[in-house]
Amino acid sequence: MRLFKFSSVALYLFSLQTLCASYPVIDNPQPASLEQKKQLHTVIEQARTVIAHLTEQEITNRFGSPQSIQTSIEENKYIGETENVFHVIRYNDYQFRIFRSSDSQYEFITHFSILSSNDGLRWGIQTGISEAQLRYLFGTPEFISDGMLVYEDAGEELSGLIAHVQNGKVIQLDFCFYYE
């Protein structure tokens, strides 16, 4: 009789564990489907196309005087005695991070953020959508940390999307086009 009770309890616990493992929850996330990965890639490429060839001057001409400009200088890790200059240009709705090497006038946008805008990207991606909508479109993020959902696109060039979420709503979208 005792053996029967032990076997019943063990079988019950095993079936409960199996049942819990079969349901996708935060501890058991499902990886993004191929379709979700394609949608993420499409939205990142759409954002890249919007800013692809903009220079700092063109941004200022297009959007006017920014709210703020922050400049930071870092030593170039690959070319000795060369400095990298980063300008962060902030507007009400957008923010741009521009890279320029001190040994050339070549510049490009490394990060583009949508802070608050009604300009929707494909599939209605914009600030104000729910976290659930974002997860439905792009699947499970690679990382989740402090209200940020981090999605990576490992296409031809590594790119990423960081969605800042507060109270279940997306409050900021950061597109990252350059990693060092």
Image: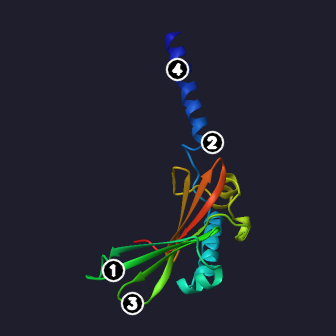
Question: For numbered disc 4, what is the local secondary structure?
Answer: helix
Q: Are marks 4 and 3 in contact (CB under 8 Å)?
A: no
Mark 1 / mark 3, whichever is N-terminal:
1
From the image, tell me which residue sits under label 3: 104
- Looking at the rendered structure, the kind of residue marked 2 is Tyr
Mark 4 / mark 2, whichever is N-terminal:
4
- Looking at the rendered structure, the kind of residue marked 4 is Ser
Question: For numbered disc 3, what is the local secondary structure?
Answer: loop
Point 52% across, 20% down: residue? 7
Question: For numbered disc 1, what is the local secondary structure?
Answer: strand
Mark 1 / mark 4, whichever is N-terminal:
4
The residue mark sitting in front, 2 or 3, is 3
Please provide percent x and percent y for residue 57: 55, 86
The residue mark sitting in front, 4 or 3, is 3
From the image, tell me which residue sits under label 2: 23
From the image, tell me which residue sits under label 4: 7
Please provide percent x and percent y for residue 3: 49, 14
From the image, tell me which residue sits under label 1: 83
Question: For numbered disc 2, what is the local secondary structure?
Answer: loop
The residue furthest left is 80
Q: Are marks 4 and 2 in contact (CB under 8 Å)?
A: no
- Looking at the rendered structure, the kind of residue marked 1 is Glu
- Looking at the rendered structure, the kind of residue marked 3 is Ser
Please provide percent x and percent y for residue 119: 72, 70
In three-dimensional space, the C-alpha distance between marks 1 and 2, rounded to whole angstroms, equals 51 Å
In three-dimensional space, the C-alpha distance between marks 1 and 4, rounded to whole angstroms, equals 69 Å
